[in-house]
Amino acid sequence: MNLLMVIFALIAIFAVVNIFQAIKEKNILALVFSLATAAVLGWFVIMTILHQGYPPKLH
């Protein structure tokens, strides 16, 4: 779960960067998908850190 959380965090960061790029290019579809990706994966990462801690507890 530790490595998966890191990968999801990187994807969420790239989605946030893409939000600004989509706004600059006025691409609505890219903006919607980037917002959804950043929200869902960002929420997953934050809740995983709050629930299990970092590094995660094994038991």
Image (tube, rainbow, N blue to C red):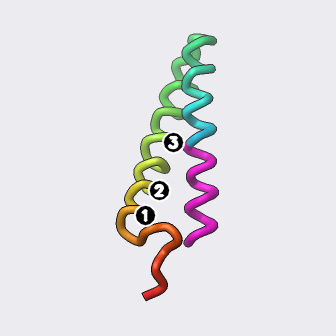
Q: Is residue 15 above or below residue 24?
A: below
For this rendering, which residue is in front, 34 or 44?
44
Q: Is residue 46 above or below residue 34?
A: below
Q: Which of the two discs, 3 and 2, labels the residue nearer the N terminus?
A: 3
Residue extending furthest toward the front: 54
Q: Which of the two discs, 1 and 3, labels the residue nearer the N terminus?
A: 3
Give the residue pinned by disc 1: 48
Mark 3 lies on a secondary structure that is: helix
Q: Is residue 11 left or right of residue 57?
A: right
Label 3, residues with CA under 10 Å away: few <14, some 14-19, many ≥20? some
Decide: marks 2, 1 in contact (CB < 8 A)? yes
Image location of residue 53, percent across then percent down? 43, 69
Q: Which residues are magenta?
A: 1-12
| Mark seen at residue 37 | 3
Give the residue drawn at x 62%, y 48%: 10
Secondary structure mainly formed by the magenta segment: helix
Does residue 18 show up magenta in the picture?
Answer: no
Whole-angstrom CA distance, mark 1 to mark 3, is 16 Å
Give the residue pinned by disc 2: 45
